[in-house]
Image (tube, rainbow, N blue to C red):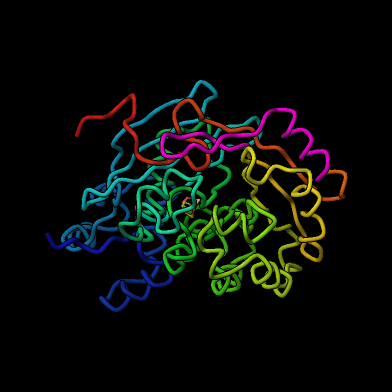
Amino acid sequence: MQQRPNLKDHSIEHLRELLSAQGHVPYRADQIAGWLYQRGIDDLDCMTDLGVELRGSLAETWDARALELSGVDRSQDGTVKAVLRAKDGAEIESVLIPEEDRTTLCVSTQVGCAMACSFCATGALGFSRNLSTAEIIDQVCRMRDISGEERRITNVVFMGMGEPLLNLPAVIEAVQLLIHPKAFAMAPRRITVSTVGLVPKIAELLACAPINLAVSLHATTDAVRDRLVPLNRRYPIADLLDELRRIEFVNTRRPVFFEYTLIEGVNDSPEDAARLAPLLAGIPSKVNLIPMNPHPDTTLRAPSEQAIDRFLRIVAGSGLRVTLRRPRGEDIDAACGQLALRKLGEALAG
Ligand code: SF4
């Protein structure tokens, strides 16, 4: 079935051009954005200030909704995982993580993932297709419906299913809508895009807005990283870190967040911990240690508490900024590396 174009695939500037080419005042695009992104209304019939004629012609040719809620699971710690279904039946997952001072939404950028990282359940799914801008943005809209007024989404991280830099045009358009004052009006520092290290695309991403970059490092030697992140065979650690040294971070004044999944017997030795600081020298860095989240597709496990504590103390002692991130939503397979569309407890009809 031929799909209709979606209003959420277009920047507000582009919508202005499209509407004025059809003889409408460009300001109509700002009004449409107000309904779609600020009020969360995507029924064109409800956009009462557009006038009957424009509403009618928009409804004939455009869609304004890209995803429907298919299932929801709620963790004991407040984390909410949702399965969302696209028009073609493809399903993806988004995760809402409430904390004391913020509510973070983790969005997906692809259906499955081609990167095949050995610790990640999404990697085991394989790759189906890229998400459109509308499908990335509609995760924010649907999850905002779930979280409600009292729990406003304050941060968005592109760390769900998929490698965001393999879908860069759609990711950049989505970032632009998140920060646009007529759309979600989020501060760029509240947005983080993660990559496993697609070196040629990093500068292009960071040129779009002063957002945060998270790099999934996970190892301090190529021998180990080759096993954990197969892309490392194409872009080894030295190439990745050289590129980060080359990029100016002065415009963001934000550190690069290095994600390091701690895996027992693989990358958790004192030698690994001691190698991190010299490796990251010259890059404004913050290291996030994440104990491995188990899932059925792997035998890899988190280290013992003592080994985690030892690793943390060595890294902190070497002068790096480091935090230990406790897994959230582990009981509903919503933690990092666990998104694999397993059956949800609270499946919704339809
Ligand atoms: S860790 Fe990220 S890039 Fe690697 S397989 Fe999982 S989703 Fe893909």
Q: Residue at x 73, y 58 (%)?
A: 254
Is 311 colored magenta in this rendering? yes
Q: Residue at x 49, y 43 (%)?
A: 337
From the viewer's perspective, is 3 left or right of 181? left
Count of numbered badges drawn on the protein: 0
Taking depth in this image into account, of 3 and 340 the one nearest to the observer is: 340
Residue 271 screen position, x and y as percent: 78, 48
Question: Which residue is outermost to the left?
Answer: 1
Taking depth in this image into account, of 39 and 23 the one nearest to the observer is: 39
Quadrant for the N terminus in the image:
bottom left
Q: Residue at x 44, y 26 (%)?
A: 74
Q: Residue at x 41, y 47 (%)?
A: 122
In which image quadrant can residue 340 be found? top left
Q: Which residues are magenta?
A: 291-315
Question: Which residue is outermost to the top?
Answer: 76
Residue 287 screen position, x and y as percent: 72, 49
Taking depth in this image into account, of 251 and 216 the one nearest to the observer is: 216
Residue 94 screen position, x and y as percent: 43, 42
User: Does residue 217 lie above or below 73 as drawn?
Assistant: below
Is 271 colored magenta in this rendering? no
Question: Which residue is outermost to the bottom?
Answer: 21
Quadrant for the C terminus in the image:
top left
Residue 289 screen position, x and y as percent: 68, 42
